[in-house]
Amino acid sequence: MKSFNPPTRTLMGPGPSDVHPRILNAMSRTTIGHLDPSFVMMMDEVKEMLQYAFKTENELTMPISAPGSAGMEACFVNLVEPGDKVIVCINGVFGSRMKENVTRIGGKAVIVEDKWGAPVDPQKLDQALTDNPDAKIVAFVHAETSTGALSDAKLLCKTAKNHGCLTIVDAVTSLVGSELRVDDWGIDAIYSGSQKCLSAMPGLSPVSFSEKAIHKISNRKTPVTSWFLDLNLVMGYWGKGAKRTYHHTAPVNTLYGLHESLVMLHEEGLENSWNRHQKNHQLLRDGLNDLGINYLVEESSRLPQLNSVYVPKGVDEAEVRSRLLNDYNMEIGAGLGALTGKIWRIGLMGYTSRKENVDLCLTALKKII
Ligand SMILES: Cc1ncc(COP(=O)(O)O)c(C=O)c1O
């Protein structure tokens, strides 16, 4: 056996995105103890910079030491108790996973369904809330990575609040790539992933919880069924003034990487990052239009960081992906579920969202198709 040396790729799929060399470099620094005072200081900076990324002053803002799916579970296992009614909006793969979380906990999921490729319909949500006055929580995906649709998180949260519900929002793909304002929009629990628009490595899930969410968690009638994700315990490690007693061994070097990616976000500015994602999306869109390639999602709800486009008639979609990989070292994503074989998902997330990548992708597609 020999050391593994991965090929150099341009990651233009649904994630992970390309990791910036500065982040890779940061991750290769000396490992120190996760209770070392220097490390604790760095963790405090990570928390503060995540608050900036989420646009929140929530004290309980931190990275969970596991991928986005663990952030999702952390929100559901802590906020949902057996018997709780949760309105789950489904317009793609990840909404279905939210429902799965609710039912496994013993909650009652009421589904608001929208077509794959469409955003969540706020009117349908309002109707479901009127029909279910005992609902306690509304859950939806801000940026549905399986389809490339962006939902109106601000309006959906307002609708939920009008009916006295807490909100759980999936921001795995939206954080840093699309406008997102946790405090202004009144989001109660939110989770993301390090490997998308933050362009850090996979394996961490930034989360944030409002005071109302913490109140519900602290007043549960039943203990949280997951030991690892029980926020009452995690707070002792990440919380303000916490003694940083041992909870689990933090992934030290991975957190160096997240720290560096957040430093880079500060240097660029959050709004500038949203704008960069939009600008490069428009460049790609114009080039794809010229090639006669059409989008699945209406312009008004398209994600800039995840472009879902129809495979042109007569083109072998898997063959194109394989040629992109073999001839151009470029990864793009396939469709999922009912969209398998019908669409490609072209990611422009984080460090990948650069003009030279747009140009390379368009040049390659032009030659292959
Ligand atoms: C919208 C959304 N939610 C949740 C997840 C799960 O994240 P992870 O794969 O990091 O566990 C993903 C991953 O692609 C996602 O796109």
Image (cartoon, rainbow, N blue to C red):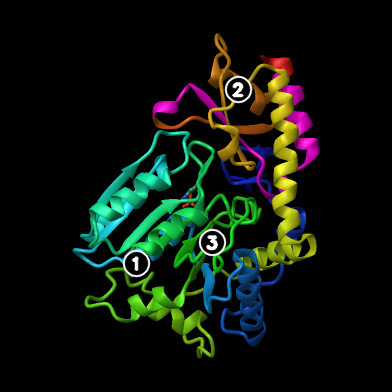
Magenta span of residues: 338-365
Q: Nearer the viewer, mark 3 or mark 2?
A: 2
Name the one closer to the observer, 203 or 79: 79
Q: CA distance from mark 1 to mark 3?
A: 31 Å
Q: Is residue 220 left or right of residue 114?
A: left
Q: Is residue 180 left or right of residue 21?
A: left
Q: Amino acid at mark 2?
A: Asn
Q: Residue at x 75, y 41 (%)?
A: 279
Look at the image and tell me whether residue 158 can be seen.
yes
Q: Residue at x 69, y 24 (%)?
A: 288
Q: Residue at x 27, y 69 (%)?
A: 225
Disc sitting over residue 204 in the figure: 3
Disc sitting over residue 294 in the figure: 2
Quadrant in the picture for residue 333: top right
Residue linked to disc 1 = 164
Q: Residue at x 69, y 65 (%)?
A: 262
Helix or strand or loop: what does disc 2 sit on? loop
- In primary-sequence order, the first of circles 3 and 2 is 3
Q: CA distance from mark 1 to mark 2?
A: 40 Å
- In primary-sequence order, the first of circles 1 and 3 is 1
Q: CA distance from mark 3 to mark 2?
A: 34 Å
Helix or strand or loop: what does disc 3 sit on? loop
Q: Amino acid at mark 3?
A: Leu
x and y percentages locating residue 340 in the rendered image: 45, 26
- In primary-sequence order, the first of circles 1 and 2 is 1
Look at the image and tell me whether residue 353 can be seen.
no
Q: Is residue 38 left or right of residue 174?
A: right
Helix or strand or loop: what does disc 1 sit on? loop
